[in-house]
Amino acid sequence: MACAFRRLSHCGRVYARPIQPFRRGEYWKQWAHRFLSVSSTHPQQQPLDTGRSSDTSNPSLKRQLSSGPRNAVDSSLSSPTRTVYKIKEQPLGGNHKKLRVIIIGGGVSGLNMLIQLKKHISGVTPIIYEKNAETGGTWFENRYPGCASDDPSHSYQFSHTPNPKCNSLFSPAAEIQKYLIGVCEKHNLRDEIKCSHSVVRAEWEEESGMWVVDVKDEDKNRTFKDRCHFLMDASGIFNHYKWPDIKGISIFEGDLIHTAHWPADFKYESKAFAVIGNGASGVQIIPELQPGVGKLVHIIRGNSWIAPPSAAVEMCSALTEKGTKKYNNLQINKFSEDPTAYREFMKNIEAFSNQRFRMILSGSPDAEIAQERAESYMRSCLKSNPSLASSLIPSFPIGCRRITPGKGYLKSLLASNVTVISEPVQVSSRGIKLKGGGIINLDAIICATGFDCSFVPRCQLIREHGNLQDIWKTRTPEAYMSCMIEGVPNYFNFLGPNGPLAHGAIPLVAEQLAKYIIRHLQKFQLEHIHSAWPLPAAIDDYSEHIKGFMPRTSWSKPCGSWYKGATKDGPVFALHPGSQSHFFHMLEKPRWEDFEWRTKAGGGGNRFGYLGNGFSIREEEGEDTTWYLNDPHGS
């Protein structure tokens, strides 16, 4: 009688032995005994090819060793004490996990995420909590004169909801806000949006695999709790404005206004003003205020490159009316009546915009040409005041700080009612106190001094290791591919740290991030996953790559910039290490091996439970049961 043999391996040797009869459960015990015996005679296994020392004095390694398993496999799967496994009586792909999703913020990113959830995910219940009285995010909050996108209008829109009826070369805030409200109506989003509701606290509950979220109803001044499987922070970083650190500013008796909180009924005509700051908002507001005010004092706290029109802007500008830079009705009708041609026009704009990253690479030919063009442009605009041009042109390379188009800005500085001050000042009760002791009396001080761009969450975010707010206040923020955080389960944030914030139009960036997130949610639903987060080793490697790459760019050079947390020489933690196309390409296929997955609270569970009863929903009546023959040449 033939004898059955089992092929076994032990310590690198392969041998055969007869299969012995065993009682129910006996083989598991024998296997467990052999496994444990072998494991006890071998050195402790190390992570594969981490490139790191085994020295536990390494802080990064200590963090990994102290907080549980670091591979993407549940540690409890190797335990011989697992409960008896039961097959789920359902086909593969059937009974998708139902998901509740809370999105913080109803701006560009939040609205797009809601659209994608409704379009691509069944069995999901999403809600947006928006702190303001209306959607729109930064475009609802910022209403100062001259506030506009610095990307061409036909670029600053969703590809799934094109807007061929843009009026201006650069859409003003009110036009973008109107567009976003139209997006809400077109995609029937209102039922899933709660305005005047702020998320103030969120805590992860491991047992249920859900976030417990405290929400404040701003109108009724009451707080209630909501729960979700996924928390998505789309609140952005351009919504928490900051006042300048200037001595005496609190005692000024005139109107003290921040551009991000502009009073709707404020009248500035014929008054004496100071505008502090020459970043994006300062460059936009100066040309709007200058013609109507009696006196304008512009206080510059640092140099900035003012760029000439880009190739994309020049292409768009050629289609606008000279002088007004607006599209006439004939051109708007052409865009509206031929969607194919309009789509091609949008692609051409984007193709030009995608070339911009080359000038960020230090010492590259594109960087040298861009800087020469910018300096020539600034000197040409200020040729009647060469000393002013010399004081404004930076010594740091172009791109180190945010580059702005600066339409009309340089010209307005030459006006007779404008005074430019680049020395340190103080504020008195009546106005600006100069270094030499003189006082410039003012009716109002406008602070165009930007936002808190630290990436510290606006609400408390509590997970196993504490509040993320406290952690990121004391160390440089790090994220996995800009949208996921170490040790924070089932959480996505938009646009950073290290996101493509200086790379292109935010609506298009938001679309690609949403597609990436959708792939995660689909995996969760199909495989009935309890929770997941990026592994510390993946975060460390990604951060190591960022730190290694950034010295190639002008972003890392010495200059005060929010890219580096408002420091001059700090690490660049706001921007993606590559071009916009590079970022989009990176997100195309998730690296599932970079995550820790749990199929139930605390780990454990069978990851293949979702395979079910051996059948697929693709075999059900009415389905194409031979779908695999539809595309024989597909990849």
Image (cartoon, rainbow, N blue to C red):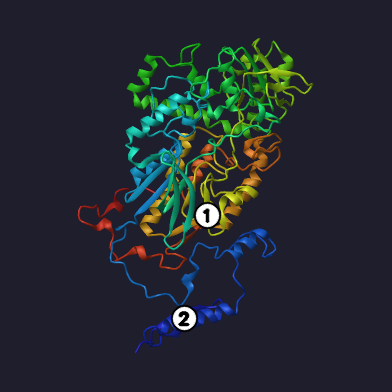
- Give the image location of residue 73, x and y in percent: 49, 65
- Give the image location of residue 436, x and y in percent: 79, 21
Look at the numbered disc 1 and give the secondary structure of its residue: strand
Measured along the vertical axis of the image, is residue 414 above or below residue 209? above
Residue that protrudes farthest toward the bottom in the picture? 1
Mark 2: few/some/many CA within 10 Å (<14, 14-19, 20+) = few
Front one among 592 and 393:
393
Look at the numbered discs 2 and 1 and tell me whether their residues touch, using CB distance below 8 Å.
no
In the picture, residue 401 is in which quadrant? top right
Residue that protrudes farthest toward the right in the picture? 436
Q: CA distance from mark 2 to mark 1?
A: 41 Å
Front one among 523 and 552:
523
Q: What residue is pinned by disc 1?
A: 462
Front one among 423 and 284:
423
Q: Nearer the viewer, mark 2 or mark 1?
A: 1
Q: What residue is pinned by disc 2?
A: 31
In primary-sequence order, the first of circles 2 and 1 is 2
Front one among 90 and 216:
216
Q: Is residue 633 visible?
A: no
Mark 1: few/some/many CA within 10 Å (<14, 14-19, 20+) = some
- Give the image location of residue 354, x and y in percent: 53, 32
Measured along the vertical axis of the image, is residue 322 above or below residue 569? above
Q: Quadrant of the N terminus?
A: bottom left
- Amino acid type assigned to the residue bearing label 2 in the image: Trp
Measured along the vertical axis of the image, is residue 34 above or below residue 521? below
